[in-house]
């Protein structure tokens, strides 16, 4: 099982380090759960925790170069970071990252052996029109699903930060669909919290959860992990 926390633009460097150190200790003796934290880029610590793995919320698909405002592989490599989140709906919607850009990032960082969490998910309009599966399939077009370190994160946009997660039936249906089309590992994200995490993680085809808001506070995240 994978439990990942996405801090988005929350926490400072000092609060991130304090949190990660405390979490790493709490993970002592916890088996069968792989935990990831995605802090802001300025808070990225050296990835030298014993149990916890740190990932970057974003990076540009270069080793280095003239790309103001971005970090590349070289900067992540220095910190020992080999896990990356791409395609989050906030990157797609606010920062206008399109499918081609996400594919370029996937191709580059997969060629460098990164573990990649690739987020996909439909908005409410698509959901209402009944076109969710087709939409998700299009988001995965050109992505090599057999890449062994790919984790697809199904995050319906209408469930992100809304307090209302997808129903258990919806989550199960989409995850079995993802399996049918060749996705090997998939997690669910969108208003996961301590009250629903266990049920969601027990669903067939669900390999874990990606948590935003409920990961910001250590006790709340630990309740989801069970540590
Ligand atoms: P949420 O965010 O848990 O706050 O809904 C999830 C995400 O955006 O990854």
Image (cartoon, grey):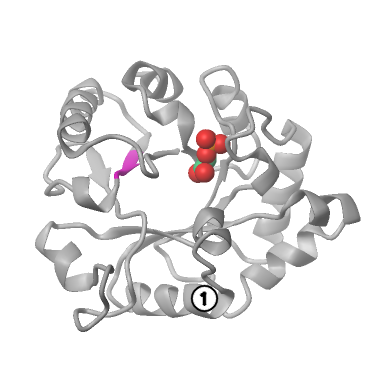
Q: Quarter-wise, where is residue 191 in the image?
A: top right
Q: Position of residue 175 (x, y in %)?
A: 67, 49
Residue 4 is covered by the magenta coloring: no
Q: Residues within 10 Å of mark 1 (few under 14, many from 20)?
A: some
Q: Position of residue 1 (x, y in %)?
A: 45, 38
Query: Toward the viewer: 190 or 198?
Result: 190
Task: Note whether residue 187 is visible.
Answer: yes
Task: Note whether residue 152 is visible.
Answer: no
Query: Toward the viewer: 108 or 98?
Result: 98
Q: Is residue 137 above or below residue 26?
A: below
Residue at 52% in and 54% down: 90
Give the residue at mark 1. Answer: 144
Secondary structure that dominates the magenta span: strand
Residue at 74% in and 65% down: 135
Q: Secondary structure at mark 1?
A: loop
Q: Position of residue 141 (x, y in %)?
A: 63, 76
Q: Tally the marks.
A: 1
Residue 127 relative to residue 68: left or right: right
Q: Position of residue 79 (x, y in %)?
A: 12, 57
Residue 37 is covered by the magenta coloring: yes
Determine if the C-beta at disc 1 is less than 8 A from ligand 1: no
Image quadrant containing the C terminus: top left
Q: Is residue 78 above or below residue 175?
A: below
Residue 94 relative to residue 42: left or right: right
Q: Is residue 32 above or below residue 84?
A: above
Which residue is at the far bottom?
66
Residue at 49% in and 60% down: 91
User: Magenta segment range?
Assistant: 35-39
Q: Quarter-wise, where is residue 67 in the image?
A: bottom left
């Amino acid at each position: 099982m994978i439990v990942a926390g996405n801090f988005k633009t929350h926490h400072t460097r000092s609060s991130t380090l304090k949190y990660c150190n405390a979490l790493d200790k709490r993970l002592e003796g916890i088996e069968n759960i792989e935990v990831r934290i995605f802090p802001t880029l300025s808070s990225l610590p050296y990835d030298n925790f014993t149990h916890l793995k740190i990932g970057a919320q974003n990076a540009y698909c270069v080793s280095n170069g003239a790309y103001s405002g971005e970090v590349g592989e070289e900067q992540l490599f220095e910190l020992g970071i080999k896990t990356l989140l791409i395609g989050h709906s906030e990157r797609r919607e606010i920062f206008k990252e399109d499918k081609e850009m996400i594919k370029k990032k996937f191709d580059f960082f997969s060629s460098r052996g990164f573990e990649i969490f690739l987020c996909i998910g439909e908005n409410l309009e698509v959901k209402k029109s009944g076109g969710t599966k087709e939409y998700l399939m299009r988001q995965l077009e050109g992505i090599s699903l057999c890449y062994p370190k790919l984790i697809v994160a199904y995050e319906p946009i209408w469930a992100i930060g809304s307090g209302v997660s997808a129903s258990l039936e919806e989550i199960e249906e989409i995850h079995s669909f993802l399996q049918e089309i060749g996705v090997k590992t998939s997690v669910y994200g969108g208003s996961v919290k301590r009250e629903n995490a266990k049920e969601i993680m027990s669903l067939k085809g669900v390999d874990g959860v990606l948590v935003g808001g409920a990961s910001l506070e250590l006790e709340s995240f630990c309740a989801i992990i069970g540590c």
